[in-house]
Each structure stands twice: as structure tokens, then as C-alpha cells.
Image (cartoon, helix red, strand yellow):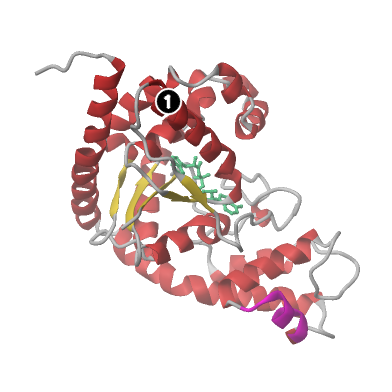
Amino acid sequence: KKRIFSAIQPSGDITLGNYLGALKNWVSLQDSYDCIFALADLHTITVRQKPADLRHHTLNAYALLLACGIDPKRSLFFLQSHVPAHSQLAWILNCYTQFGELQRMTQFKDKSKKHADNVNAGLFTYPSLMAADILLYQTDFVPVGEDQTQHLELTRNIAERFNNAYSPTFTLPAAFVGKEGKRIMSLQDPSHKMSKSDENVNGCVYVLDKPDDIMRKFKRAITDSEASVHYGEGKDGINNLMEIYSCITGETFDQIEHDFSGKGYGDFKAAVGEAVIEHLRPIQERFAQYSSDRDYMEQYWNDGAEKAARIANRTLQKVMKKVGFIPPH
Ligand code: TYM
């Protein structure tokens, strides 16, 4: 079986963008791949986190991913900080990553503008920790949204550089980006991606939002003055709503245009809101159960970390030997 690895930062409440761009795919990939998933908690502190919030978001994210259908009996599912090999390999890969490469990362450029008071070294080397996450597991495919593909490209370059300098060590991973849902936009500003840290609360739908809030956000979504439901240029708002509706219902854009021909935006927005609410309802119900059972979660994240560490340490030891470090025993 081919190996899949992916991760999500527990840096805030999980969004519909995270779900449609990544999590929903992770769940279905479990049937055909050997899957490893992590909460990238080490990555979150590149931006200042309140300790209590980080704990809260991490527990919630773990429960929510279980509720979405990540099955810890089939897939390893753990916290990045529980497997020290991630930090250890990240240091080594830092020394095989060029300053200029990191400087070109658009996420770094965006975040260093947004958090200008805290442009720390971790924010800069974020992608080499991400490369370590992926390369430790000899990963074939990495299911992510479009915003992560540049980091994946860099990961391949680092891996190739190391392989060429020594001998084949790392599998070269490929990004696995879904056809639909790869870039869900803010409902209030469809030129920006929907993001956990959106200041405009109406722009971002969270997977755990109450039905009334979800409906309100969709009803207020920015559209255009044309009042005709079809996919097209200059219709970013409607395009985004069609994309969301299509992801959830499986309908093609042609079908959607046909179903809503002659209807106004109000009807369409309400239909999208309703579809999302109904899709998320069972997830929210399961979340309520998992999140109140910390023992249950703990058993799986311990088990996941233990098994992940065994795989990761094999790669780490190979790497350390090739570099020329003397093994401790
Ligand atoms: P993060 O936590 O920002 O997002 C998790 C996943 O959700 C996707 N995503 C979106 N997809 C579509 N539309 C959107 N609006 C949207 N917003 C987010 C992201 O592409 C991602 O797949 N660096 C990663 C976490 C990470 C990781 C890794 C991923 C750490 N190590 C190793 C893969 C492999 C991140 O910050 O994702």
C-alpha cells in the first residue's frame, strides 16, 4: 500500500475550508492507503498562542477529526509534539535548506506581514519542519489544499538534495490536491481564502458552528449584481458558493446551474446553507461524544505516537548515519 501523510495545525477552530480542502479527502483515502495523520502542534507556536487556547484547540481538533471519520484503528493519528523525531529531523533539514528558498515562500511573506511584531526564526523555517513531518514516513502522497503546494514543492527539493548528496534516503512525496474544494474562499471577501484567523466572523464557516450561524453566514455571503446562478469570470462569490455546494452534494456545476435557473441568489444561498448544515449535523453530534471522553482520545494518540515513532526513528537513524554522526550505542 502507498503511504499517505498529512497534518493540520490546531491553531484555532477548524473551518469548512479545512474540511472540504483536506479532511474530507483524508477520510476517504483511508480505504486505499496506509494513512498517517498528525495535529501539527509544533507549527502553531510560530504565531504566539495562549497555552490554555492551544490545549483547548488541540483537544477539540483531535475530537473533531475523529468525528469527521478519521479512524484511529486503521490510521495512525497523533500529536506532532509527541514524536521527537519531527523536531530532530527538522534541525538536520534546516541545514539542507537555503535561506533564499524559505524567503520565497508566499505563506512566510503573508504571515510576516500579518504578524510584523513577531517574525521569529520558527516562522521562517516552518517549511523545513513540515518537510521533516512528511519525509520521516517515506510518504508517497500528501493530501492538502492548494495553499500548501508550494511547501510540498520545497519538501521535494530538500529530499532530492539530500538523496543526491548521499544516497537514496527519502521517498519523493507528491501533493494530492482534490479537484474541488482545494481553495475555499471567504464568504465576505472571495478574493481571499477562508481562514481560521479571519477577522471577519461572517467570512468563515466553522465546522462546529451552530446551524443558525451557518445559515446567517451563507445568507450574508457576498455575491454580484447579476442575479443568475452560473459559474463565470467576475463571479468569485457565486463560484465559491457553487464549489461548496458541489463538494457537499456531489452535483456538477451544470446540474447546479440547471436546478437554480430562474431562481434568485437568496434561494441559492439558503440551499447551500441548508446542505452544509445537514452535512455537518452528524459530525457535530459525534464531536459532542468524543470531546467529552479524553481517555478514549488519549489511548489512540498514545498508540499512534508510539507506532509513528517507530517508523520515524528508522528514517532518522538512517539520516544521522549518512550525515556522519556517531550512533550512541
Ligand atoms: P492548515 O492547518 O493551515 O490547514 C490544514 C489543511 O486545510 C487546507 N486548507 C484549505 N483548503 C481549501 N480551502 C481553504 N480555504 C483552506 N484552508 C486550509 C490546507 O491546505 C491544509 O491541507 N502547514 C500545514 C500543516 C502541516 C502539514 C504538514 C500538512 C504541518 N505539517 C505536513 C501536510 C503535511 C498547515 O498549516 O495547514
Quickly name the residue at label 1.
Answer: 164
Write down the quadrant of residue 257 in the picture.
bottom right
Compared to 178, does 10 lie above or below?
above
- At 38% from the left edge and 26% from the top edge, which residue is drawn? 90
Q: Which residue extends farthest right?
A: 226
In depth, the one of 137 and 2 nearer the eye is: 2
Residue 191 in the image: x percent, y percent? 76, 50
Q: Which residues are magenta?
A: 251-258
Residue 179 in the image: x percent, y percent? 60, 62
What is the quadrant of the C terminus in the image? top left
In this rendering, does residue 52 appear at all? no
The answer to whether 27 appears left or right of 212 in the picture is: left
- At 23% from the left edge and 27% from the top edge, which residue is drawn? 317
Compared to 329, does 30 lie above or below?
below
Residue 278 in the image: x percent, y percent? 52, 77
What is the quadrant of the N terminus in the image? bottom left
The answer to whether 46 appears left or right of 238 in the picture is: left
Q: Which residue extends farthest left?
A: 329
Write down the quadrant of residue 291 in the picture.
bottom left
Residue 157 belongs to magenta span: no
Residue 169 in the image: x percent, y percent? 33, 32
Give the structural element (helix, strand or loop) at label 1.
Answer: helix
- At 75% from the left edge and 54% from the top edge, which residue is drawn? 190
The answer to whether 194 appears left or right of 19 in the picture is: right
Magenta segment's dominant SS is helix
Residue 253 belongs to magenta span: yes
In depth, the one of 190 and 167 nearer the eye is: 167
Compared to 249, does 154 lie above or below?
above
- At 32% from the left edge and 36% from the top edge, which residue is drawn? 136
The amino acid pointed to by label 1 is Asn
